[in-house]
Amino acid sequence: MRKLLYSVATLVLFACGGEDTKQKDITINVDVPQKEEERAVSARTLKELKNASKVVYTLPSPVEMADILHETKAVYDVAILNDPNAIDNYITDFKRSLNLGVYFADLSFTSMFDYPQEAMKFMGAAQAMSDELNIQGVFTDEVMMRLEENMSNKDSLMDIVASTYMDTDLYLQDNERPIVAKAILAGAWMEGLYIAVNLKTESERESLIWQKIGEQKPALINLVKMLKECEDKQFDSMIVELETLVTIFDEVKLDYKSDTNSTDEASKTTTLGTSLKVDISEDTYKKIQAKTTQIRNSLTE
Amino acid sequence: MLRNLIILTLILTSLFTGAQNCNRMAKKSVKDLAPFRFNGTLHKVQLSEGESAEVSLVLRGGKKYRILLNGGRASGKLNFKIYDRHQALVFDNAKHDNAQSWDFKIKATQEYHLVVTYPSGDEGYNDTTMRGCVALAVGFLDDNPQ
C-alpha cells in the first residue's frame, strides 16, 4: 500500500522511463583530441551520470519548433495543417492524445507565423480535444478570454500557448496518465517536423531549412527512446515507422568541432563553443520529407 | 478499519497538497525566467536526499538559454551539472556559488545532459513522502537579436 501511495506522488514525466540508457551518436564525425586529464574527467563524470536514478528524454516543444522554423524566414500553407473540425474523427483516447499534440503544434505555428484567426480555431480544437480526454482546468474561460484579448500580440499569444501546453502536461503528471502525456509530446513533435519538411522558401535558402531539419536527429532518437520506455503496445507501430525514419536520418552527418568554453561570472553566462556543420543532401531531405509526411498522416487520418 | 481509512485519507490529502505545492513552486520558476521566453516544457521531479535525476536537453545554436532550478526549501543547495554529448563536464554550479540559475550561449545545436542532485541532509519539503520537489525551467532568447 505504501509503495502504491508513493507511486501516486512520483511524477509521470518519469513514469515511462527510469532506466539509464545513454544515447550513442553513431554517425557523428568528431575531431576532439582528448588529453589525459580530459579523459579522466570524462570517466569520472560518466560514473556520475550512471548514478542518476531518473532519466528524462526531452523533445523541442511546439513553441520551440515554431521558433526554429520562424527564424528561417520560410512560409507554409495553412491548408497543410490538421483540420480543426476533425475532433469527432478520433475515437480512442490514444488517437485523441496524438492529435491534441498535433493541434498544439498547429496552434504554435499559426501563432508564431501571425495567423491569429487560425490560431483561435486551433485553440478551440485543442480545448475540445482536451475536454474529450477529460483534462481539466487548462482551457478555462479565463484562458480563452486572454487569448481573444491578445490575438494581435504574438508574444502574449506564444506565452499563452506555452502556458497551456505546460498546464496540460502538469495535469497529466499529477493524474498519472503517462501514455496520454507521451502521445501528446509525440504528436506535437511529429506535426512540427511535418510542417518543417513542407515549408516553402526561396531556393537559395532551402539548405538552411534542411540544416534545421538535420539538427532534429538527436530529438528523433530521444523520441524513439521515450516511446520504447513506455512499453505500451499502442506505440508499437509508430516506433517501427520512426525507426525507419531514424535510418534515413542516419544519412545526415553532424560534424561537430570542439572549441573552448568560456564563462563570464559577472553576467552569470557560459558560452559553449562547439560548432556544427550539418551535411544533408537533397535526396536525403526528400526521403525524410516523404517518410515524415507518411507518419504524420497516419496520426491524423 | 476506520483508523486505516483515516490514515489513508490523511496521506492522500497530504500527497494532494504536496503535488499542488510542487506545481505552484514549479510555475513560479517559469515566471522567474523573464525576460527569457519559456520553452513550454516544465520539468518537475521528486527526489530524496542525495538522489539525482538526469534530463537530456537539445539546446539550439544561436540562442541564449536560461536554466533555472527551484528546490523549495532546498533552493540554494541543489547541485546541477551539465555534460556534453561526449559526457564531458561543461558546467558545475558548485564552482559558481551553487547558483540556481545560469545563462548559456550556444554556438551549435547539440544535446546536453543536465544532472540535478538533491542535497544530502535535507528531508525534502513533503514530510509524508520524505521527497523533495525540484523544478527545472528553461527559457530562450535570440543570442544576437536584430
Image: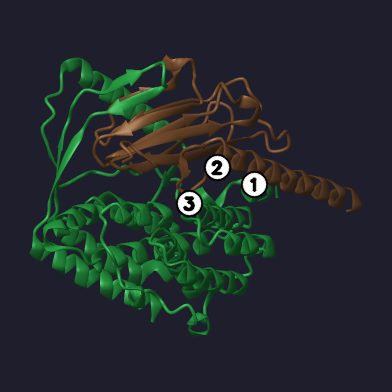
Chain colours: A green, B brown
Residue A85 at x, y percent in the picture: 50, 82
Q: Nearer the viewer, residue A233 or B42?
A: B42
Of the residues under marks 1 and 3, which one precedes in the sequence? 1
**Residue to which mark 1 is pinned:** A9
Q: The numbered mark 3 sits on a residue in which chain?
A: A
Position of residue B31 measured from the top left corner of the image (x, y, whole percent): 58, 39
Residue B64: x and y in percent read: 36, 36
Q: Nearer the viewer, mark 1 or mark 2?
A: 2
Q: Quadrant of the C terminus of chain A?
A: bottom left
Task: Label 2: state its secondary structure.
Answer: strand
* For residue B74, above or below residue A84: above
Indicate the amino acid at tag 1.
Ala
What residue sits 42% from the left and 22% below the top?
A: A268
Lateral position of residue A74 relative to residue A178, left or right: left
- Residue A131: in sight, yes or no? yes
Residue pointed to by mark 3: A155
The extreme right residue here reads B2
Report the Cα–Cα distance between label 1 and label 2.
12 Å
Of tags 1 and 3, which is closer to the observer? Answer: 3
On what subunit does the disc labeled 2 rest?
B
Q: Are marks 3 and 2 on the same chain?
A: no
| Residue type indicated by callout 3 | Asp
Give me the residue at 74% from left, 45% from top.
B17
In three-dimensional space, the C-alpha distance between marks 1 and 3, rounded to whole angstroms, equals 34 Å
In the image, taking residue B122 as reference, residue A274 lies left or right, namely left
Q: Do pointers 1 and 2 mark residues of a single chain?
A: no
The type of residue carrying mark 2 is: Lys
Task: From the image, tell me which residue sits under label 2.
Answer: B44
Q: Give me the C-alpha separation between circle 3 and circle 2.
A: 25 Å
Viewer-proximal residue, A66 or A168? A66
